[in-house]
Structure formats: structure tokens, C-alpha cells
Image (cartoon, rainbow, N blue to C red):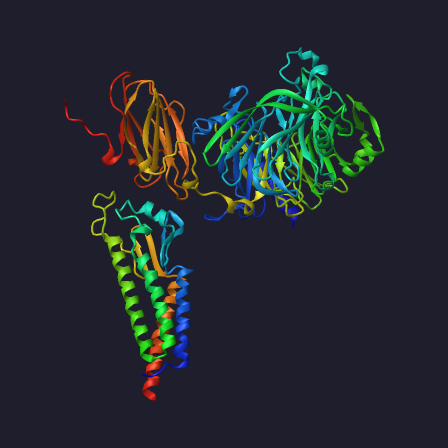
């Protein structure tokens, strides 16, 4: 069993620090803009909460029969912090164990967590945009209101822009770092 | 070349058959006036201009330099538009010892100050007719407090303010006997007093309290200004009718060559108060305050006031002779010069505070007025502005050593330098200017830049609207050597004094919504689940909510003819600019306009059976028109049960028995 390079070994700390930002900054932001909202509306998604103009958005979406957003309805806000803390503890184990295989498994778990998170986010957005109250006052045939996973979309009078926030970018950086170091370790192993 | 052109013109005129004409007002605007007042769509004005409403009783707010009206703040008059004075919560604001007074005549405004500069916290306003002083919050633009002034016949010399908002003054225009004494009018000289009230302002809450009243000899207090800098601690009041006439004042109060500027050493007065001097007098006056958490006003009867007699308490009050019924008595930004504007005088006297104190110390007096020393005119005089114009009224300052005085009779603004009392420039106003305003013009640090004229006569300035016209204001650019007219704008009511403040000082503190979680109204419905209808005898309290786009409950049955129905409507919205209105058919008082997070109450007494529609009056959303409901009113003594709800909870048809 081959040991990690010094770079690989200490990169675990960098990854952990990147992920700690999840408790200090939002992961994601969805910006909405309409003629009546010149300053725009912003919903930020945190590791354990939804904040900013959520109440205002909730006040608007009953017209088209969308459900209101409440922190309590997301089991993700319970599981995600647990998953991320577990993942960070695992990083410490990788550091102590100091084996390449540990790092590869760690990266694998991150990839699965990441992909599942995006799938889960997409699924929520799909339900949020499609599961509409059949008695809604405004019904546009064929129209659904799924926000974009990432990027820009126009939904009736609203323009919607969805993108990572500070902690989200650090999360992505953590992923890039993990994959890069994995490749680096793998290459080093082959050349020796 | 020039003479050639002139000749050609003359020939042209002769051919066209034109006679000679006097210069008209159309040609006055020159240069790039339009670009100076143009505020592009989406951009903001540089100044808020708070303008007194005169006989409208309200305060209006304009943007400068555009002259666009931004808001009318209801203060002393009822305002059915938003229920002010009609909702149960606001009725106590207009309570007085004479009962509910639905109007007044509002003349002067004062922005609160810290260190002699506008701090943007509050705006004070006077009620001239039923003597009162109001305080308006500059974060909500709502009237928060109204204090009645006892021993006053007309609160004109008000609400002028000291440099740290220690005091707001209220001086009476009509001298009257103290208390509610019944005396012959002809006993003016013996029985009538001119009372100047000093109202203490709490630095945190802004709450007002009459600290003391100074009972001056019978005359008329017109305007006033606090000293600042070196003259801080003094207050100056202009007077007329020191002749003490009680009839045909037009003639009888214009006899004397000089009236007075009353100089009050209020720090000295404070010492007397501390030493327990003065007379505690039984009286009555109402003190009305608004509570932002209960969204309601309360009204309290006060029954005592402390009166100081200047003839008895020495070194507190002095008189400075001032020519011909002075109106303005304005203190320059340095606090050294006091400008008196005798409205029938042909000159402007400028007094020096330094000289005044020297004269007082050296007792350079020419006599006394009912026991109050009268300082020798020349001893306090800095200089006289010669031939400034006709009928000087009021002066403000640009902070660069210049003064701007309004002239009613010659209808002009005259710019002059304080140091050497020389006239520098003059511009006509359209027509007959009263007060004028330089942004920050009464402070230690005026913003300068503009002078705004508030005119008494409008005539041909705008498209005619029958005999009753809007009032006219004019904006002048004063950044150059020459004052330049750049805009006319119409105003509501009749503006007297106005003040302007840099928008930056207050705009970011403007409240957008009221936090519903802080709503402590006794009849609030915290959410639709908390809505209910409660009957107590013939009183029916409806705890109602409004949110886009329905009222809860919107079907109500079991109300009888003659019931006193109170609609307590809570606006559940927490988003900016989403007020809801509430109106019900035959409402004999007004509608409500309820801000996000606020609760307001409309009293309604149905006088006949039937179905009464009610609805939201403020276009709140795409489904605003659907925001409506019904109240069923049954005959008195019938047994229709009390039922209410919205949607699935609405009262259902009962199967016939």
C-alpha cells in the first residue's frame, strides 16, 4: 500500500477548510427580477437553511399555485450537515492513515455526495416547478416554473438566475482539488 | 452692426404694428435652466423639501431640483385618503381641549438639529389656529406626536428650534389673558400677555414636554430663531403691535417707528427653573403620542404649566428696537448676526450679538418696556442694508457670507453680503414672495446651491383652473454671482416656511415595512388562523387579515342593524410597497390604508339591513379586483347566528328544517 505524497497528504486540510465555508456562507443563490421588483429578489440556500427574500417569494407564488418554501420541509437541512461533517472527519482519517487508496476512496465518496446533491436539488426544483395547485388563480397551459439548476431562465414576468454562492464555489474548488490530487497521486504511483 | 440690427428691429416692429410693451415674465429664464432641474427617470432628487401646507394643515414633500411632489404628510388635518383622523387608532392624534379638531393652519417647519446641523431625525410643525406643535418622524414620514399649547392665542412664532434640539419654541401671535379669563377686550394693556413656550425635546424618543412659559407683555410674537455658536443659549423673537392695539391693527399696530426683537436668555431661564422660581399654573392641554408598536395613538390631559415673569426675573429678557413690525428675525450661520426684517421698513437692520452682550453688560439701555430693559438701537446694531427693496420678510443664508431676503411688496429676492451690508444682486419672484428657503439655510452649515421662493400670489404662472389656483414656488440657482430662475412648481395649500435637507441624510433610513412580529396592536390577527369575530353586547370586533389577494374572513353573518362594528384589519404582507386598503359600502367616515405589518381599525354602524360589500382599495396585485367580501346585516333582534370565514371556512347554506 503506497503512501501519499506530502502535497497529497496536506491537501486534505485544504479540502476541509474549503468545506468549513459551508457554515459561514450560502451555497447557492437564486436571483429573480421582474418589472415590479427593480431591486430584484434573492433566495440563498445554506447548508441548513433558506434565507433572504423567501417570504416575499412565498407571497408571490400562490398565484400560479406553487408551494411555499419552508425550512422545515427540507430533510436535506438535517442530513447534509451530518454528511459533510462525516466527510471532513474521514479526511482527517485519510491524513492519519496516509495511504493513496484512502485518498481515492475519499474522492469517490465526495463525487457520489456531490452528484447526489445535484440530483436532489434538481428533483426538488422539478417538483417545485411542476407540482402546481390545480385551483391556482393563474394557469398558463403547458407552463411549468422549474427554476434553472444553474444559469438563466425566463418564467412569465420573472427572470431567474441560479448560480453557486461563496460556499458553493469553495465546494466546487474542493471537488476540483480532490480530483486533481487523485490524478497526481495515481500518476506518481505509476512512475515509481 | 449693432445699431443696424436695432434699426431693423424698430422697422420690423413698426411694420407689424406693435406698440411698446413692458417687459413680461416669459423672457426671464435664460441659459441651461432645463438641464439644471432635469432629474432623469429612475434618478433621485438631491434634496427633500418639506413645505408647510398653510390652511391645508398638512406638510408636503417635494424633490429639489425637480419640484416633483413626493408626499403629503397628514399632520393637523384629517386625510380620508389613508384614514388619518378617521381610523380609531389615529383619532386621538387630533384630540384637543376643544374636542376633536379636524383641521388647522400650518405655517412653519423645523428639522431637528445636532451641533447646529440638520440631523434628519424629526420634523416639527406648528398649528396656528388651535395652538399645537407636531413632531413627524423622518423614518416613517408619519406624525408621531402633537402637543397642545396652553396660554396661547395663535401659535405662529413656532416651531423654531435650538442647535441641539434642546427646545422647540411656541410663541403666540395673539396675546391673550392667561388661563380662560373673561375680561373686556379693551383691557388689553392690563390683562393680555404674549406667552413664549419652551418645549423640551427628549434626545432619544423625541417626546415633547413644556418646560416653561415666559409671559411677555401683551403684543404679537411673529417669528423667531435660536442663537447658535456664540449666541447659543439665546432665542430671538420678532414682534409687532407693541402699540398694544386691540382693534384695527392694520393702522393702530403700525404707528410706532420701531417695534422689538425680544432676546431671551433661555439658559438663564433654565437657571430660574432649577432654582424653583416661576409660578406653577393650573391649566389644561392635551398631549397626543403615536406608538409604532401598537400602531395607535393615545391622548393624555396635562394640567399644569410653569410660568416665568420676565419683569420679576431679571437678566432673562431684553428688547432690541427694530424698525416697523418685523417679521423675520434670522440668525446667520456664524451665530453673530441677527437680521430683522421690518415688513413696512425701507431698510434691513443687522444686529451684532457681540454688541448686544456688550450693551447689556454696560447697561446701554434707552428705557424699559413693562420692566424689561430696552437696549439702545445703535448699541446693538452692526449695520443697515440701505434701499434693499420694499417689505422685507425673511432671510436665509448660503454659508458663504451672503444673505438672501424675500421682499413681499417689491416681489423679489435680494442677495446681500452680511459683513458690509451691501446689496449684491436681485431677482424678481412671481408673485409676492413670503418665505424663502436655502437648503440648510438656518443651520451652521447651509448646503447653499438653491434658494426657493414660496409665493403668495400665482395669477398667470400655470394653466388657469378657475378662481382658486395652486400656489406657486420658484427655484433659483445661487451657485453663481447672479441668482438664476430655473423652475416654477405648484404647491398644495398655502406654503409659508419650508426647509430642505440633503436627501443622503434621510433616504437610507426610510422604513419600508413594519415588522409584523413587533405588532402589539390589541386587536392584531397574527396570521389567518388568528382571525375571528367577537360580539360583546352590540359591539362586534372583527379581527381581519389582508394578504394578496383576499381578506379573512370575507363572509360575515350575524351582525344586526345598529351594531357598532369594528374592522381591525392587519396587513400580513412583509414586502415593500404592498399596502392594502379597506372600504365598506356606506362607511360614513373613511377608508383605511394599511401598511405592511400594520393594523388599522374602521368603525362602522350599519343603519339598515342588507348585504354590505367590502373590498381592498389599493391596487395590490393582479387579483386586487377579487379582493372583496360581504357583510350580512340582519334586523335588530333577529337570531341569525354569528358566522364567518373565507373559502372553505365561509358560512354554508343550512339545510331547511
Q: Residue B214: give x, y in percent of width and height.
A: 69, 26
Quarter where residue B181 is shown: top right
* In this rendering, position of residue B488 left or right of residue B483: left
- Camera-side residue of A184 and B246: A184
**Image location (x, y in percent) of residue B35:** 54, 48
Residue at the limit of the structure toward the top, as seen here: B184
Location of residue A138 with respect to B209 vertically, above or below: below
* Image vertical order of residue B111 relative to residue A75, above or below: above
What's the residue at 20%, 52% (across, down)? A142
Image location of residue B97, percent across then percent down: 55, 20
Q: Where on the picture, by quarter, is residue B117?
A: top right
Instruction: Looking at this view, name the residue that lies furthest to the bottom.
Output: A192
Q: Is B552 situated left or right of B136 in this image? A: left
Count of all numbered marks drawn on residues in the image: 0
Q: Is residue B385 visible?
A: no
Res. B52 in view: yes
Seen in the image, is B236 located left or right of residue B119? right
Which image quadrant: the C terminus of chain B?
top left
Q: Residue B183's x, y, as percent?
A: 66, 11
Residue plotted at (34% across, 78% down): A182
Residue A144 against residue A188 in the figure, above or below: above
Determine whether A25 is above or below B580 in the image.
below
Residue appearing at x 24%, y 34% in the figure: B649
At a point 42% along the width and 76% down the height, the residue shown is A10
Q: Quadrant of residue B158?
A: top right
A2 or B495: nearer the viewer: A2
Front residue of A169 and B416: A169
Amino acid at each position: 500500500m503506497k503512501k501519499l505524497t506530502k502535497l497529497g497528504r496536506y491537501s486534505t486540510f485544504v479540502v476541509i477548510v474549503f468545506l468549513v465555508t459551508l457554515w459561514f456562507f450560502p451555497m447557492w443563490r437564486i436571483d429573480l427580477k421582474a418589472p415590479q421588483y427593480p431591486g430584484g429578489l434573492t433566495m440563498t440556500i445554506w447548508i441548513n437553511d433558506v434565507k433572504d427574500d423567501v417570504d416575499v417569494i412565498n407571497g408571490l407564488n400562490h398565484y400560479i399555485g406553487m408551494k411555499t418554501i419552508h425550512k422545515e420541509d427540507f430533510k436535506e437541512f438535517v442530513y447534509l450537515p451530518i454528511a459533510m461533517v462525516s466527510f471532513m472527519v474521514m479526511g482527517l482519517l485519510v491524513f492519519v492513515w496516509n495511504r493513496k487508496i484512502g485518498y481515492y476512496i475519499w474522492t469517490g465518496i465526495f463525487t457520489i455526495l456531490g452528484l447526489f446533491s445535484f440530483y436532489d436539488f434538481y428533483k426538488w426544483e422539478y417538483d417545485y416547478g411542476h407540482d402546481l395547485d390545480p385551483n391556482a388563480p393563474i394557469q398558463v397551459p403547458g407552463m411549468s416554473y422549474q427554476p434553472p439548476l444553474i444559469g438563466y431562465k425566463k418564467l412569465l414576468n420573472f427572470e431567474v438566475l441560479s448560480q453557486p454562492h461563496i460556499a458553493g464555489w469553495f465546494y466546487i474548488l474542493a471537488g476540483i482539488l480532490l480530483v486533481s490530487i487523485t490524478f497526481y497521486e495515481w500518476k506518481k504511483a505509476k512512475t515509481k | 452692426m449693432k445699431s443696424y440690427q436695432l434699426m431693423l428691429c424698430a422697422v420690423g416692429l413698426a411694420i407689424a404694428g406693435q406698440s411698446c410693451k413692458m417687459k413680461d415674465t416669459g423672457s426671464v429664464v435664460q441659459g441651461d435652466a432645463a438641464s439644471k432641474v432635469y432629474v432623469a427617470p429612475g434618478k433621485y432628487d438631491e434634496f427633500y423639501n418639506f413645505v408647510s401646507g398653510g390652511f391645508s394643515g398638512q406638510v408636503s414633500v417635494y424633490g429639489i431640483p425637480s419640484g416633483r411632489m413626493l408626499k403629503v404628510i397628514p399632520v393637523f388635518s384629517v386625510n380620508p385618503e389613508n384614514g388619518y383622523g378617521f381610523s380609531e387608532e389615529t383619532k386621538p392624534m387630533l384630540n384637543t381641549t376643544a374636542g376633536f379638531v379636524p383641521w388647522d393652519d400650518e405655517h412653519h417647519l423645523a428639522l431637528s438639529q445636532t451641533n447646529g446641523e440638520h440631523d434628519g431625525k424629526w420634523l416639527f410643525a406648528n398649528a396656528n389656529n388651535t395652538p399645537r406643535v407636531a413632531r413627524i418622524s423622518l423614518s416613517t414620514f408619519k406624525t408621531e406626536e402633537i402637543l397642545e399649547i396652553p396660554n396661547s392665542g395663535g401659535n405662529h412664532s413656532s416651531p423654531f428650534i435650538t442647535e441641539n434640539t434642546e427646545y422647540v419654541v411656541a410663541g403666540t401671535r395673539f396675546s391673550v389673558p392667561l388661563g380662560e379669563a373673561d375680561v373686556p377686550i379693551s383691557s388689553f394693556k392690563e390683562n393680555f400677555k404674549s406667552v413664549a413656550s419652551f418645549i423640551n425635546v427628549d434626545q432619544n424618543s423625541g417626546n415633547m414636554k413644556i418646560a416653561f412659559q415666559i409671559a411677555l407683555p401683551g403684543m404679537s410674537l411673529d417669528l423667531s430663531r435660536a442663537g447658535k455658536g456664540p449666541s447659543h443659549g439665546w432665542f430671538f423673537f420678532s414682534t409687532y403691535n407693541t402699540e398694544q392695539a386691540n382693534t384695527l391693527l392694520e393702522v393702530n399696530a403700525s404707528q410706532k417707528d420701531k417695534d422689538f426683537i425680544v432676546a431671551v436668555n433661555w439658559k438663564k431661564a433654565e437657571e430660574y427653573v432649577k432654582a424653583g422660581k416661576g409660578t406653577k399654573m393650573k391649566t389644561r392641554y392635551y398631549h397626543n403620542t403615536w406608538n409604532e408598536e401598537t400602531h395607535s395613538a393615545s391622548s393624555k390631559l396635562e394640567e399644569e404649566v410653569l410660568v416665568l415673569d420676565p419683569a420679576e426675573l431679571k437678566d432673562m429678557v431684553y428688547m432690541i428696537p427694530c424698525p416697523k413690525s418685523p417679521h423675520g428675525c434670522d440668525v446667520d450661520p456664524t451665530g453673530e448676526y441677527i437680521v430683522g426684517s421690518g415688513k413696512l421698513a425701507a431698510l434691513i437692520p443687522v444686529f451684532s450679538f457681540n454688541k448686544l452682550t456688550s450693551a447689556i453688560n454696560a447697561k446701554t439701555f434707552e428705557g424699559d418696556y413693562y420692566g424689561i430693559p430696552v437696549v439702545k438701537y445703535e448699541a446693538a446694531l452692526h449695520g443697515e442694508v440701505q434701499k434693499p427693496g420694499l417689505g422685507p420678510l425673511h432671510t436665509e443664508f448660503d454659508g458663504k457670507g451672503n444673505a438672501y431676503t424675500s421682499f413681499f411688496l417689491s416681489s423679489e429676492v435680494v442677495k446681500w453680503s452680511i459683513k458690509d451690508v451691501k446689496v449684491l444682486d436681485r431677482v424678481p419672484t412671481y408673485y409676492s414672495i413670503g418665505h424663502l428657503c436655502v437648503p440648510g439655510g438656518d443651520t451652521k452649515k447651509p448646503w447653499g446651491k438653491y434658494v426657493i421662493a414660496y409665493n403668495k400670489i400665482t395669477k398667470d404662472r400655470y394653466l388657469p383652473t378657475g378662481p382658486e389656483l395652486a400656489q406657486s414656488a420658484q427655484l433659483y440657482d445661487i451657485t453663481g454671482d447672479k441668482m438664476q430662475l430655473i423652475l416654477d412648481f405648484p404647491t398644495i395649500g398655502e406654503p409659508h416656511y419650508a426647509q430642505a435637507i440633503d436627501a443622503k441624510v434621510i433616504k437610507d433610513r426610510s422604513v419600508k415595512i413594519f415588522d409584523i412580529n413587533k405588532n402589539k396592536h390589541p386587536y392584531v390577527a397574527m396570521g389567518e388562523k388568528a382571525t375571528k369575530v367577537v360580539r360583546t353586547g352590540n359591539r362586534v370586533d372583527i379581527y381581519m387579515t389582508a394578504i394578496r389577494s383576499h381578506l379573512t374572513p370575507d363572509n360575515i353573518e350575524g351582525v344586526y342593524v345598529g351594531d357598532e362594528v369594528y374592522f381591525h384589519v392587519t396587513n400580513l404582507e412583509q414586502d415593500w410597497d404592498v399596502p392594502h386598503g379597506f372600504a365598506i359600502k356606506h362607511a360614513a367616515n373613511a377608508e383605511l390604508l394599511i401598511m405592511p405589518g400594520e393594523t388599522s381599525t374602521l368603525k362602522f354602524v350599519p343603519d339598515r339591513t342588507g348585504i354590505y360589500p367590502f373590498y381592498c382599495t389599493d391596487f395590490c396585485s393582479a387579483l386586487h379586483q377579487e379582493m372583496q367580501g360581504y357583510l350580512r346585516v340582519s334586523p335588530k333582534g333577529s337570531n341569525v347566528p354569528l358566522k364567518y370565514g373565507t373559502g372553505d371556512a365561509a358560512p354554508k347554506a343550512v339545510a331547511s328544517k
